[in-house]
């Protein structure tokens, strides 16, 4: 068990490293495609990235706000999270915070909100976007939960900086964002013992733009006190000329009641890229620090993606759950 001072010093060093990375590499041009760097506009979380994105069924807590809102009511949590992510090849950086509460009521109805700011290729297309979300989840008996997330997305991009120069297909606008509006996600999750089956639709207003692509995902997972595994499939109906899919799989194991070891794999048919990922986390009854790293393989323009997440677990009832329970995932 690390000492308090040792753990504090380690966390401070990690934060300094993540803050320094974007500044050191900012002058380098983006070497990935815009589709790779933007990555469907998905918001990163250390657990999701480490498990290959395969958390449609098992992703509770703050992860549920982004992947499947129905999962928020499946764990008794009051979690506050801050995270940062960076990709040197895509020149992408993301900073965000989220909170989810399913404790301060007796009906297991859960709610949460999140906000992120991201930047892609500041010396090229110079795309920035702000993503705000608010979600709720409602249990229907012991075996089914439903959820919805309202999302507001604002995207801005430089003028005459896209791959086709001055072009309606890839250019920015001089006085207004290239996308600025609401959309929503709907999800459902069924539970039977340790098994969960999740289904979700993202951006269901069908905005008709790759900045907010309409997608559908299905995930099947199993979770216990010591390990979790899941496999997912996703269809993207907007980004490409025809629907393209993703296959995702991941797992995690808890060691010594405090340490989470994670690994995953993602195949994206749209970019034809395989991406393995790994992650580690230290999970205390009151807080956690988690890291994840994903690296593209078999790609002409491989991307590295790193995420740091810090979470605080507030327990208004005064009854802390053991750190190896799924509630803290």
Image: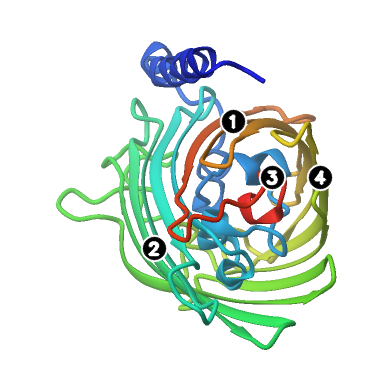
The residue drawn where x is 49% and y is 55% is: 318
Label 1, on which residue? 305
Label 3, on which residue? 271
- Disc with the residue nearer the chain's start (3 vs 4): 4
Distance from disc 3 to disc 2, alpha carbons, whole Å, reads 27 Å
Q: Position of residue 284 (x, y in %)?
A: 59, 36
Question: Residue most toward the front?
Answer: 318
Disc 2 element: strand
Crowding near the residue tagged with mark 3, few <14, some 14–19, many ≥20 C-alpha atoms within 10 Å: some
- Disc with the residue nearer the chain's start (1 vs 2): 2
On the picture, is 215 further left or further right than 57? left
Residue 251 — which label? Answer: 4
Distance from disc 3 to disc 1, alpha carbons, whole Å, reads 16 Å
- In depth, the one of 89 and 253 nearer the eye is 253
Disc 1 element: strand
Disc 4 element: strand
Q: Position of residue 5 (x, y in %)?
A: 48, 13
Distance from disc 1 to disc 2, alpha carbons, whole Å, reads 23 Å
- In depth, the one of 187 and 244 nearer the eye is 187
């Amino acid at each position: 068990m690390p000492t308090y001072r040792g753990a504090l010093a380690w966390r401070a060093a990690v934060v300094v490293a993540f803050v320094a990375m974007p500044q050191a590499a900012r002058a380098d041009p983006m070497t990935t495609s815009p589709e790779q760097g933007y990555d469907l506009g998905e918001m990163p979380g250390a657990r999701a990235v480490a498990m290959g994105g395969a958390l449609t069924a098992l992703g509770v807590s703050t992860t549920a706000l982004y992947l499947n809102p129905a999962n928020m009511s499946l764990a008794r949590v009051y979690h506050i999270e801050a995270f940062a992510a960076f990709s040197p090849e895509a020149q992408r950086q993301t900073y965000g915070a989220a909170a989810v509460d399913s404790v301060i009521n007796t009906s297991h109805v859960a709610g949460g909100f999140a906000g992120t700011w991201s930047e892609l290729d500041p010396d090229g297309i110079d795309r920035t976007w702000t993503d705000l979300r608010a979600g709720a989840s409602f249990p229907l008996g012991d075996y089914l939960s439903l959820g919805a997330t309202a999302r507001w997305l604002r995207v801005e991009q430089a003028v005459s900086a896209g791959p086709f120069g001055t072009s309606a297909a890839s250019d920015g606008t001089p006085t207004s964002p290239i996308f600025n509006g609401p959309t929503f996600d709907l999800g459902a999750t069924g539970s039977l013992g340790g098994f969960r089956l999740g289904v979700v639709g993202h951006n269901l207003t069908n905005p008709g733009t790759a900045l907010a692509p309409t997608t559908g995902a299905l995930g099947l997972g199993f979770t216990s006190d010591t390990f979790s595994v899941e496999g997912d499939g996703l269809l993207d109906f907007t980004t490409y000329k025809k629907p393209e899919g993703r296959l995702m799989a991941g797992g995690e194991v808890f060691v010594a009641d405090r340490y989470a070891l994670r690994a995953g794999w993602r195949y994206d048919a749209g970019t034809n890229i395989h991406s393995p990922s790994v992650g580690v986390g230290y999970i205390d009854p009151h807080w956690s620090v988690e890291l994840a790293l994903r690296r593209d393989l078999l790609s002409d323009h491989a991307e590295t993606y790193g995420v740091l997440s810090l979470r605080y677990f507030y327990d208004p009832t005064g009854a802390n759950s053991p750190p190896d329970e799924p509630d803290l995932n």
